[in-house]
């Protein structure tokens, strides 16, 4: 009997040994659509307006979890770039920050091309982590622009990681900046990489940057009406067997509880962007498969986290490097100019008014996605302007007939890329009507829109090149001022000194 009890005791010890009984734990931490949010953001939609995010505070939270968890990987699924510091350093500040925070892999997003192919390529070669894009090729040679995938090994666990960018994301890159590249349907390339990696690794993770463009608003978690879906990721998960986890981006869609595909079991996760949340996903692996998982989005409470001194020092270095540029006050604003992705906004109206005045046009258009930060009440610095208008777009003008103007307005009212912002136009619309039939009336400077009448139209080069799917702009021949929009606004403020509240009531929703 004693021998039998001893054997049973030894058997229980064996079954409880990590190598035989317990599943191994794999923790995946993830971010997406950081957009140069180096500093904490006031969460004005929460009681007391606590601060969320900030790179140094995010880094501290990541370190705390690395100390606590057994096996940790850190990934980002694209759009680290945009914003003032990214603009002035052509992305270098972001890549340096990611190295300090010890990211394990980075999936390419559309904004990584904001400063052209060569600037981003230089950054790829300088960083210590793999930058992945399995479906981006050079048109002329057919060669991959970057690595398609990588294998990471830690604590005896091997992860195969693949990166892809969606075709929608391609459409929001300044077309002239990526003329040499071919962005292909990602599904066959993911399938090929999965087939090659499956026998070599324990877990396969795909970093995706696809779906509909996100709302570009830091309060998206508070406004469900602006949130996008993640149907493209669901489609990918259903089309390709063998993907364990999709860490997605581009839509800024915070997935509070990980989505599990009903057919393939693929787990899909994503944050709201801007570093206000850190994605946390724990996988339990039995040596052959993932048996279960736990996932959530952790708020980065800046007021409760001591900033990581190394990250803070690096950010300070870059800020000091450009302080002589960004610190100059160029004007004053009577009000805070704010964005709204799904409606007329004060910042959108201001931008469109500047375009109209500078180009000497009758009407002007500005895409909602081109507005990246609010402008403060009071002193406005160059840094504020570069944060709000970070892209290398120039102002252009052309002539369009009324029918073309109507087509552009109808496309804006589809909400596919947010509400088009306008100047010189008053339109009444009904979102309950079918797409392309939502305009009820249009006036141009107080007079009814004439379908055959010619109008001088001002916009910026991104839209003129058909950006955000506005193909109608491709029908025009443009006069290009060849000065970045941000510089145009800076010069405008130096002359006019003050920003007054723009006239509202240009785009009126029928109640």
Image (cartoon, rainbow, N blue to C red):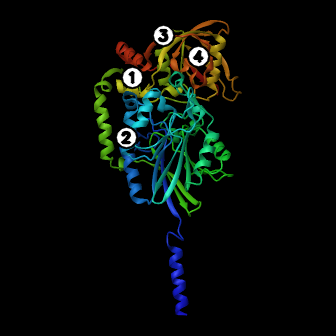
Q: Tell me if residue 312 comes above or below residue 334 in the rendering.
A: below
Mark 2: give few (<14), some (14-19) or many (20+) Cα within 10 Å: many
Quadrant of the rendered image containing residue 129? top left
Q: Residue under label 1, please give it.
A: 334
Mark 1: give few (<14), some (14-19) or many (20+) Cα within 10 Å: few
Q: Position of residue 98 (x, y in %)?
A: 40, 42
Q: Residue under label 4, please give it.
A: 426
Q: Position of residue 312 (x, y in %)?
A: 31, 42
The tag on residue 359 is 3
Q: Left or right: where does residue 218 sit relative to residue 171?
A: left
Quadrant in which the N terminus appears? bottom right
Disc 2 is placed on an element classified as helix
Q: Residues under labels 4 and 3: Cα distance?
A: 20 Å
Does the CB distance between marks 4 and 1 fall below 8 Å?
no
Q: Residue drawn at (69%, 23%), measured in percent from left and top?
A: 436
Q: Residues under labels 1 and 3: Cα distance?
A: 24 Å
Q: Residues under labels 4 and 1: Cα distance?
A: 24 Å
Mark 4 vs mark 3: which is more N-terminal?
3
For discs 2 and 1, the disc positioned in front in the rendered view: 2
Q: Residues under labels 3 and 2: Cα distance?
A: 39 Å
Mark 1 vs mark 3: which is more N-terminal?
1
Q: Residue under label 2, please give it.
A: 97
Disc 4 is placed on an element classified as strand
Q: Position of residue 283 (x, y in %)?
A: 53, 58
Towards the viewer: 378 or 272: 272
For discs 4 and 2, the disc positioned in front in the rendered view: 2
Towards the viewer: 133 or 452: 133
């Amino acid at each position: 009997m004693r021998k039998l009890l001893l054997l049973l005791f030894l058997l229980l010890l064996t079954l409880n040994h990590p190598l035989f009984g317990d599943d191994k734990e794999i923790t995946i931490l993830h971010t997406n659509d950081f957009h140069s949010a180096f500093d904490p953001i006031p969460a004005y939609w929460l009681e007391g307006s606590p601060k969320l995010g900030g790179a140094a505070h995010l880094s501290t939270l990541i370190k705390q979890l690395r100390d606590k968890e057994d096996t940790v990987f850190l990934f980002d699924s694209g759009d680290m770039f945009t914003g003032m510091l990214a603009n002035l350093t052509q992305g270098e500040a972001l890549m340096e920050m990611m190295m300090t925070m010890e990211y394990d892999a980075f999936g390419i997003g559309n904004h990584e091309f904001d400063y052209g192919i060569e600037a981003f390529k230089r950054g790829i070669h300088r960083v210590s982590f793999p930058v992945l894009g399995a479906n981006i090729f050079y048109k002329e040679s057919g060669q991959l622009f970057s690595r398609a995938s990588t294998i990471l090994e830690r604590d005896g666990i091997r992860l195969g990681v693949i990166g892809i960018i969606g075709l929608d994301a391609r459409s929001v890159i300044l077309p002239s900046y990526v003329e040499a590249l071919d962005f292909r349907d990602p599904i066959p390339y993911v399938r090929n990489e999965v087939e090659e990696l499956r026998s070599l690794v324990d877990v396969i993770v795909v970093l995706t940057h696809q779906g509909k463009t996100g709302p570009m608003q830091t309060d998206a978690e508070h406004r469900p009406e602006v949130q996008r879906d993640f149907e493209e990721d669901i489609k990918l998960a259903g089309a390709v067997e063998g993907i364990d986890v999709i860490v997605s981006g581009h839509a800024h869609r915070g997935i509070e509880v990980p989505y599990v595909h009903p057919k393939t079991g693929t787990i899909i996760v994503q944050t709201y962007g801007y570093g206000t949340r850190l994605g946390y996903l724990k996988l339990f692996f039995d040596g052959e498969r993932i048996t279960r998982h736990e996932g959530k989005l952790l708020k980065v409470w800046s007021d409760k986290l001591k900033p990581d001194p190394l990250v803070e020092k690096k950010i300070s270095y870059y800020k000091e490097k450009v302080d002589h540029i960004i610190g100059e006050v160029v004007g004053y604003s009577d009000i805070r100019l704010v964005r709204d992705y799904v409606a007329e906004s004060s910042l959108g109206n201001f931008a469109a008014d500047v375009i109209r005045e500078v180009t000497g046009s009758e009407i002007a258009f500005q895409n909602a996605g081109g507005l990246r930060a609010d402008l403060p009440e009071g002193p406005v610095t160059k840094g504020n302007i570069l944060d709000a208008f970070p892209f290398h777009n120039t102002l252009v003008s052309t002539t369009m007939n009324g029918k073309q103007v109507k087509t552009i307005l109808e496309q804006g009212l589809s909400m596919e890329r947010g509400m088009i912002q306008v100047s010189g136009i008053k339109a009444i619309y009904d979102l309950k009507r079918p797409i392309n039939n939502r305009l009820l009336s249009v006036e141009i400077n107080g007079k009814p829109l004439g379908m055959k009448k010619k109008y001088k139209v001002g916009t910026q080069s991104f839209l003129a090149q058909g950006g955000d799917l506005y193909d109608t702009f491709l029908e025009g021949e443009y006069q290009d001022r060849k000065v970045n929009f941000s510089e145009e606004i800076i010069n405008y403020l130096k002359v006019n000194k003050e920003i007054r509240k723009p006239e509202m009531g240009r785009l009126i929703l029928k109640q």
